[in-house]
Image (cartoon, rainbow, N blue to C red):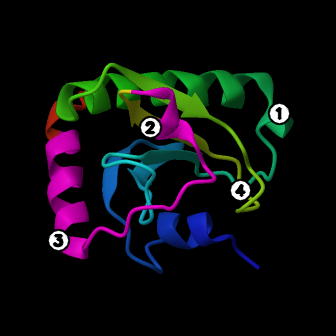
Amino acid sequence: MSSIFTRIIKREIPAHIVAEDQHHIAFLDINPLVSGHTLVVPKQEIDYLFDLDQEGYSQLQLFSRKVAKGLKQAIPCLRIGVAVIGLEVPHCHIHLIPMNSMDDMNFSRPKLSPSPEQLASVAETIRVEISL
């Protein structure tokens, strides 16, 4: 069975996509830690980040860097935090999280529940800043 991320890639379920190329996609987390929390995913369905071959791993990191630079321009923050947890969805992914404090990356705190309209607005703001 396809992961939820594969279903997003195939457009079977909607997502607020901020960037995409032939091999990767980046979209907003629908229950973010902070506004702008973005997931970067390879289109190839591989469960574990370190199971990607060297080229796939390198390209995912380079794509994440481009997204992070645009994200930082779009969302006022001190830094973009990076996390790879990978337990909640069996499809490797990188969390890019705008940070103003260490607590912004605390995955145990309650998540936000933005409306679809709020997510769409944030996604558009980020898309404008990403130059792929």
* Percent x, y of residue 58: 65, 21
Q: Which residue is mark 4?
A: 91
Q: Secondary structure at mark 3?
A: helix
Q: Which residue is mark 2?
A: 97
Quarter of the image for residue 51 reads top right
Foreground mark, 1 or 2, reads 2
Q: Which residue is mark 3?
A: 117
**Residue type, mark 2 in image:** Ile
Q: Residues within 10 Å of mark 1 (few under 14, many from 20)?
A: few
Quarter of the image for residue 5 reads bottom right
Residues at marks 1 and 2 touching, judged by CB atoms closer than 8 Å:
no
**Residue type, mark 1 in image:** Phe
Residue drawn at x 63%, y 53% is 108
Q: Is residue 132 visible?
A: no
Left or right: where does residue 96 sit relative to residue 17?
Answer: right
**Residue type, mark 4 in image:** His
Q: Which residue is mark 1?
A: 50
